[in-house]
Amino acid sequence: MTLGTRAGLTMGKATRDAFGRALQEIGASNPKVVVVDGDVANSTRAEWFGKDNPERFFNVGIAESNLIGVAAGLAASGKIPVAASFAAFLLCNSYDQIRMSVAFPKLNVKLVGSHAGISIGEDGPSQMGIEDVSLACSLPGMVVMVPADEHSTRKATQQMIEHDGPTYLRVGRGDVPLIYDENVDFQIGKANILRDGNDVTLVANGLMVSAALDAAEELAAEGITARVLDMHTVKPIDEAALRAAAVDTRGIVVAEEHLHHGGLGSVVASTIAQTNPCKIAFVDVGDQFAKSGDGDALLEEFGLTGANIAAKARKIVQG
């Protein structure tokens, strides 16, 4: 992964790995936590919990709709179920079950979608979750989180378990640059300001946070100061941080590894339209499916780069 090189970031572990370790640690101290797996625990890293707690680990096979039904039943029985699978399988295959068995009754089910975005590369479009954030956000009462690195993912996993209600946590396959240290302040619904600036604001989540920091470095060399917000929680969105960005800077660029419609960009635009309308530009996958290929090459081809974020920011500042 080449993102974060301009900003001088050190490469860390994949967010799926951080989720797996955090879940393993939580499982040792919280007997109410159980895991429901769709036969992909070796990929989601939920297997680490399962090896330590085989009596609290349930592999239902490649049957995501049933997975959600089992998780809902466990939640109704007072357990804290973590339902983990690939983002595309979990949100797309079992959306109706999530809607009716989890969101509607407001059950305390923790959904974790791994291998999200186009950066999974060679696995191809059938396994690339690029609409998952949109689907999760559309469900009433669902908290939606997309952490940027291993340390914030650990904190996000802890807060997911502590939160009372349905949540969706999005994690990725590949290693990503370190944005934070172990003492990261991660709060559901509160963005982290990684860099301040008065000319333009870059709002990003997931692996695009490191790309936004790259863009900020590129712009700084030209005398343009960019505020960088890690909007790790898409729902509930940090309205105050966005309102301040709209007032303090000339506009906002939103970057996400997701389809154009329904994700972080849509939520930011909707929020700003109701508070302080300003210029907004978007860096995302667009209205298209990706393809199989090298992960870094796909990010470059689809414009999910610091250079493209910087280009969108220049237009806002100059125009």
Image (tube, helix red, strand yellow):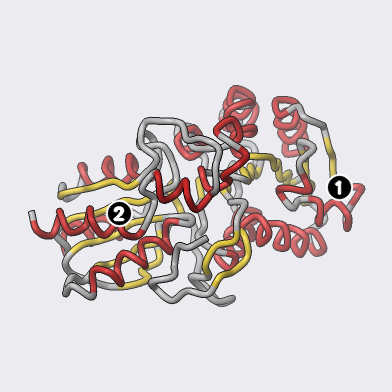
Taking the spot 58% from the left edge, 59% from the top edge, the residue there is 156
In the rendered view, tell whether residue 56 sits above or below residue 5. Answer: above
Give the label, 2 or 1, closer to the camera: 2
Taking the spot 58% from the left edge, 28% from the top edge, the residue there is 92
Taking the spot 36% from the left edge, 48% from the top edge, the residue there is 303
Q: Quick one: 266 or 2, which is closer to the camera?
A: 2
Label pair 2/1, CB-CB below 8 angstroms: no
Q: Position of residue 17 (x, y in %)?
A: 68, 59
Q: Position of residue 173 (x, y in %)?
A: 62, 51
When asked about the image quadrant of residue 3, the answer is: bottom left
Residue at the spot of label 1: 56
Judge from the rendering whether residue 55 lies leftward or rightward of residue 22; answer left or right.
right
Judge from the rendering whether residue 115 lies leftward or rightward of residue 70; answer left or right.
left
Judge from the rendering whether residue 10 lies leftward or rightward of residue 305; answer left or right.
right
Q: In whole angstroms, how far apart are the C-alphas of marks 2 and 1?
A: 45 Å
In the rendered view, tell whether residue 151 sits above or below residue 132. Answer: below
Looking at marks 2 and 1 on the same chain, the residue that comes earlier in the sequence is marked by 1
Q: Quick one: 116 or 190, which is closer to the camera?
A: 116
In the rendered view, tell whether residue 119 sits above or below residue 137. Answer: below
Visible in this render: residue 182? yes
Outermost residue toward the left? 319
Q: Position of residue 254 (x, y in %)?
A: 31, 51
Q: Mark 2: few, some, or many residues within 10 Å (few <14, many ≥20)?
A: some
The amino acid sitting under disc 1 is Arg
Q: Position of residue 14 (x, y in %)?
A: 62, 60
Q: Mark 1: few, some, or many residues within 10 Å (few <14, many ≥20)?
A: some
Q: Which mark is residue 308?
A: 2
The amino acid sitting under disc 2 is Asn
Give the SS element for disc 2. helix
Give the SS element for disc 1. helix
